[in-house]
Amino acid sequence: MKKADIGIYGLGVMGRNLALNFNDHEFGVSVYNRNLPGEEDLIAAFSSGEAAGTPIRTFNEVESFVASLERPRKILLMVKAGPPVDAVIDQLTPLLDEEDILIDGGNTHYSDTNRRLETLSQRHLRYIGMGVSGGEEGARHGPSLMPGGNAEAWPPVQPLLESIAAPSPEGGSCCAWMGPQSAGHFVKMVHNGIEYAIMQLIAECYQLMRNGLNMENQAIAHTFESWDSGLLNSYLLEITTRIFNTEDESGSLVLDHILDRAGQKGTGRWTALTALELGVPLPLITESVFARSISSFKDLRRQASDTLRFEAGGEPNAISTTSLREALLGGQLVAFAEGFWLLKTANEEFDWDIPFSEVARTWSGGCIIRSALLQPIATSFRENPDLPHLLLAPAFREILNAVQGGWRSTARFGVERGIPVPATTAALSHYDNLSTKRLPANLIQAQRDYFGAHRYERLDRPGGTFFHTDWTGGHKG
Ligand code: 6PG
């Protein structure tokens, strides 16, 4: 019997849909799932359900699963990130031969991928850490794929991965090699940080329309729908509109019944923590993580809202929804700019070779943050791969000027009405800090030198020369 082109280990929703996707593209597929409590029936259910009538081969024994694969074997691990990945690797490695390829398609922390790469390369096995975005639908019909790791592993898997990925509006498929080590998982982590930011920005527009402009759900739905075109055209706005049109059996909007406590699996937090470690200012992404965190303190917020609530007096200082749209556009640009700034810094720090325009192209279809904005972003990096900051790209100069008024009145409106707009204001702070030639950091330096003799550089002397002042010496003027 002809051996399979790819093996999928893990029959959760992503693994199952990727298996069907590979099969649609005429690749031979073998699948296996561990016999864990609660997962005993997954193989049988898949075999008699979604995979019935297809040539996909299902296995109950890991040895026969591995033996069914064409060499070098290519096994895509679709198991929960963390210790389960190590357990699966430990189970598989004795069965593998040199040059076989393992691909981890989970949301794995990049440091784990670096560690696994190191261990597996000592055994002459090839390893790829691959970001997979697009959820269930993407996995089935075209995800965005962000592989990175052992460069020698790329050519054998490239045709398979490119075939199943979503087509990119930029041309080609939404799959590109992100670089060595854990570059692929790092890019996916940053993708999720941007995802957190855009979701929070949209949520703040909803809150401003609902609580600030007293708009009904239907009007909010129409507004979001009308925004979902031009540069703001995006998957997240599209699903937001759909959410506003989804009713339950009683005919009321499902959204109105959902508890306002946002979950998070950790990738946004990792992005923020990595930004802090690498010294890259990502206020928007970080505030968006905090916004989810504070939402989870529902009881405390309920208590505080009784005593701390600020009631804005007088006439509501109404603004138009056009202003909100401008704030969303400005904010989204900052979200992408923050993501690419972190990527650029990591690229230098870890000596990777991340192709920024390819990252934008890979994100332009299939993934959760796909958006029309990614096309000018890809072009900007193609024209200037050394672009120091995305907001400095000529393509965005006019847009950034045009949204200033609405962006600022949106932030002002939220602040004046006591409606929390942490992401909108953080995005604006990023913009304002970046575009301020002279920040008050001279005072911070003076304070540090005052209490800790930390010394400072002077504007009128060459950089790298440090000075200390005897601040308590009584010298004045
Ligand atoms: C994607 C998503 C996906 C997943 C997130 C959700 O790109 O397909 O980002 O990876 O939905 O893990 O993350 P939170 O639970 O942290 O919101």
Image: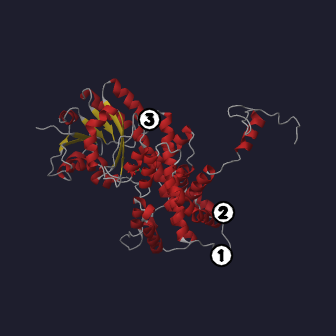
Q: Is residue 405 left or right of residue 188?
A: right
Q: Secondary structure at mark 3?
A: loop
Q: The C terminus lies in which quarter of the figure? A: top right
Residue that label 2 marks: 307
Task: Using the numbered discs, state the Cα–Cα distance from disc 1 to disc 3 in whole angstroms.
Answer: 55 Å
Q: Is residue 301 above or below residue 392?
A: below
Which one is earlier in the sequence, the residue at label 1 or at label 3? 1
Give the x, y percent position of residue 253. Answer: 42, 70
Q: Nearer the viewer, residue 123 or 412?
A: 412
Q: In percent of the image, x 49 and y 55: which residue is there?
A: 395
| Amino acid type shown at disc 2 | Thr
Q: Is residue 224 visible?
A: yes
Q: Secondary structure at mark 2?
A: helix
Beta carbon of the mark 3 residue lies under 8 A of ligand 1:
no
Residue that label 1 marks: 315
Q: In percent of the image, x 41 and y 45: which residue is there?
A: 188
Give the x, y percent position of residue 407. Answer: 57, 62
Give the x, y percent position of residue 401. Answer: 57, 60
Taking the view exactly as shown, the residue that stands out farthest to the top is 122
Q: Nearer the viewer, residue 247 or 242?
A: 242
Q: In percent of the image, x 59 and y 57: which residue is there?
A: 425
Q: Secondary structure at mark 1?
A: loop
Which one is earlier in the sequence, the residue at label 2 or at label 3? 2
Which circle marks residue 352 in the picture? 3
